[in-house]
């Protein structure tokens, strides 16, 4: 059953994504690595500040690649200083290999400092988490199946409360971009 | 072998791809997807089709597709009009993958196309798809290769569970042409 996740809710337990950890010193998108589970409970427990999850319908699609994710990557230190965001998970329903390659290519083009929040690129396989929480979109008409919607979500450390949830309702980046996140009242 | 009694390669599944354009050479910039209609592409042409489990997945990135990209001139010399690389990934991912592999040619002799939900590969037979749901990768097109001349299948073989052997190596197809 799908429950629509809302601000003020507790972030669901047991969410698992898959990812290939990215070493900023090795950004070859064609390198072969094996995906590992990303236990979100563990990330939330280990993060001393807030955790930001940013979801896109597809890696390498024009909107997210050009307008959505790069501005977030270029403002990671602002997000840390102003919103106490210590972990960032960039997520989509693409598989972990695709996310890994995309993440590496984006990082090559971004100014990400080593003092910023912990950064992960993770796969919501079959859009399971997104579908269970009212955060998916049906892109079947474009031959892309069920995808995670474009949204940004901030989870408070300790309480695991959803402090901010900005989901796009039409094409574009209005509620889930870096400006909306920096202006969010937490 | 495909089930089709007259040995024709199926053409009823519209594929999708983003053509390479030198106006968008960066891997992270994508153009608009187009439809690839095999019912128009295959008649009167010699076409090589090869499928991989997925963009950016091991080992197809390192070994399989480069055998085709490295041999474009030889395929052209053998009269092949087009090479089509298939995966179930969406056209944006395939487009990025093609560029990451170094294929940046405005003539789009090699097209990296999406087999939507492996619908085309399913028609070729059960060995032409690979269920990788347990790995969170869903249903994939298996690794396979085909030579289709004027719509008729001249070579069509699939690998065992996504392996990469001579079956789908470009050099095997070049010898069969």
Image (spheres, rainbow, N blue to C red):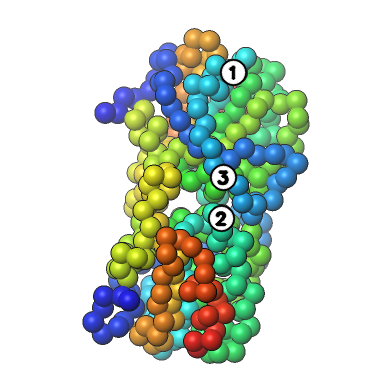
Kindly identify the residue that appears in the image at 57 percent across and 37 percent down: A121
Kindly identify the residue that appears in the image at 64 percent across and 21 percent down: A86
**Quarter-of-image position of residue B106:** bottom right
Examine the rendering and report whether any part of residue A88 can be seen.
yes
Examine the rendering and report whether any part of residue A71 can be seen.
no
Position of residue B82 relative to residue A164, above or below, is below
Q: Which residue is mark 2?
A: B58
Q: Which residue is mark 3?
A: A34
x, y percentage for residue A51? Answer: 56, 22
> What kind of element bears circle 2?
loop
CA gap, disc 3 to disc 2?
Answer: 9 Å
Kindly identify the residue that appears in the image at 43 percent across and 27 percent down: A15
Kindly identify the residue that appears in the image at 75 percent across and 25 percent down: A115
CA gap, disc 2 to disc 1?
Answer: 31 Å
x, y percentage for residue A54? Answer: 53, 32
Q: Nearer the viewer, residue A100 or A177?
A: A100
> What kind of element bears circle 3?
loop
Mark 3 vs mark 1: same chain? yes
Q: Quadrant of the N terminus of chain A?
A: top left
Q: Label 1 marks which chain's residue?
A: A
Mark sitting earlier along the chain (3/1) = 3
Report if the CB atoms under discs 2 and 1 are less than 8 Å apart: no
**Quarter-of-image position of residue A120:** top right
- Left or right of A68, for residue A104: right
Q: Label 3 marks which chain's residue?
A: A
- Left or right of A4, for residue B86: right
């Amino acid at each position: 059953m799908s429950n629509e996740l809302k601000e003020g809710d507790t972030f669901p337990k047991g969410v698992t994504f898959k990812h290939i950890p990215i070493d900023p010193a090795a950004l070859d998108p064609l390198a072969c690595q094996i995906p590992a589970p990303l236990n979100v409970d563990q990330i939330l427990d280990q993060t001393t500040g807030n955790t930001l999850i940013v979801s896109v319908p597809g890696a390498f699609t024009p909107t997210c690649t050009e307008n959505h994710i790069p501005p977030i990557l270029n403002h990671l230190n602002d997000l840390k200083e102003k919103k106490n965001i210590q972990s960032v998970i960039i997520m989509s329903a693409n598989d972990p290999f695709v996310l890994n390659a995309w993440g590496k290519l984006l990082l090559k083009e971004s100014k990400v400092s080593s003092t910023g929040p912990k950064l992960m690129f993770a796969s919501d396989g079959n859009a399971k988490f997104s579908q269970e929480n009212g955060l998916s979109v049906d892109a079947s008409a474009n031959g892309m199946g069920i995808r995670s919607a474009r949204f940004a979500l901030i989870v408070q450390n300790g309480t695991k409360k959803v402090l901010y949830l900005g989901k796009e309702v039409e094409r574009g980046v209005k509620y889930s971009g870096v400006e909306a996140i920096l202006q969010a009242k937490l | 072998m495909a089930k089709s009694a007259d040995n024709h390669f199926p053409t009823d599944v519209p594929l999708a791809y983003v053509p390479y354009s030198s106006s968008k050479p960066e891997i992270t910039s994508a153009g608009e997807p187009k439809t690839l209609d095999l019912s128009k592409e295959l008649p009167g042409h010699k076409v090589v089709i090869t499928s991989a489990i997925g963009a950016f997945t091991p080992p197809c990135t390192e070994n399989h597709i480069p055998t085709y990209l490295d041999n474009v001139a030889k395929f052209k010399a053998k009269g092949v009009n087009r090479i089509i690389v298939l995966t179930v990934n969406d056209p944006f991912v395939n487009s990025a993958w093609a560029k990451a592999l170094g294929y940046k040619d405005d003539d789009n002799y090699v097209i990296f196309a999406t087999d939507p939900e492996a619908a085309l590969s399913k028609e070729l037979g059960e060995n032409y798809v690979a269920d990788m749901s347990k790995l969170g990768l869903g249903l994939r097109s298996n690794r396979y290769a085909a030579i289709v001349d004027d719509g008729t299948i001249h070579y069509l073989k699939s690998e065992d569970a996504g392996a990469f052997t001579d079956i789908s190596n470009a050099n095997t197809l070049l010898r069969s042409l």
